[in-house]
Image (cartoon, rainbow, N blue to C red):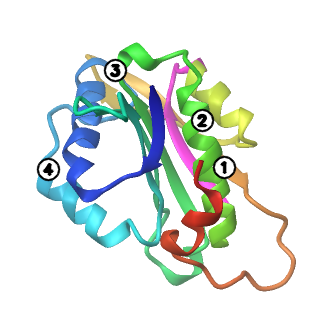
Amino acid sequence: MIEIRRAERRQVGEILRITNEEAARSIATAAYHDEPLERWESAWDQEHEAYPWLVAIQDAETARERVIAYAKASPFNPRDGFMWSVSLSVYLETAQRGTGLAAQLYELLFSLLRAQGYQAVYARVALPNPASIKLHERFGLKQTGLLPQFSWKFDRWYDLAILTGRLSELKGPPPALKSVTEVWELKRP
């Protein structure tokens, strides 16, 4: 059984494991080496109330439960005028690709972000990656930019697609943002 939950700090190491596995085998992340747990724990400590971190748990009802995928939002830019815009990430264990799990994670993530009052989403996708482009387009993002030959990995240059999307129609000043905790009970599965 797979269950999607709000991530907990104790799961940051499992989230990082998935990211590091992705870094070792694909261009989806520009990292060459395992990233330090301390950096991810610091990001968690600073972000998890303002930006949703979600995990997909396999064997959720057993002692063998483990994180098999995650999706999260993070600040697009620290300047005040960008506080209603977020950067998106979603990563899955290899065995979970093509199962629809990324879309399930994004369904909940987008629902939370809307309820919190966020207005715009942003994603970067190293090309070629048709599955990631299709996923983001399914959620209304469009490629609005291209950074040619912007990432070097596995002995070649890769283009980086910039995808952006709206979470709501802009009319007047943006709303006050709510915390993840404030909206979680309303939106959780």
Q: Is residue 123 magenta?
A: yes
User: Mark 1 falls on what kind of element?
Assistant: strand
**Amino acid type, callout 1:** Thr
Residue 153 location, x and y as percent?
Answer: 29, 24
User: Mark 3 falls on what kind of element?
Assistant: loop
Label 4 – label 2 distance at C-alpha = 26 Å
Residue 49 location, x and y as percent?
Answer: 42, 71
Residue at the image point whose x is 39% and y is 14% from the top: 95
Residue at the image point whose x is 24% and y is 26% from the top: 21
**Amino acid type, callout 4:** Leu
Predominant secondary structure, magenta span: strand
Q: Is residue 19 above or below residue 115?
A: above
* Residue pointed to by mark 4: 37
Instruction: State which tag comes first along the sequence, 3 or 2.
Output: 3
Instruction: State which tag comes first along the sequence, 2 or 1.
Output: 2
* Residue pointed to by mark 2: 104
* Number of residues whose C-alpha sits closer than 10 Å to that of mark 2, classed few (under 14), some (14–19) or many (20 or more): few
Q: Nearer the viewer, mark 2 or mark 1?
A: 2
* Residue pointed to by mark 1: 164
User: Mark 2 falls on what kind of element?
Assistant: helix
Q: Nearer the viewer, mark 3 or mark 2?
A: 2
Q: Is residue 76 above or below residue 134?
A: below
Magenta-colored span: 120-130
User: Is residue 137 shown to the viewer in this render?
Assistant: yes
Drawn side of residue 38 relative to residue 161, left or right: left
* Residue pointed to by mark 3: 26
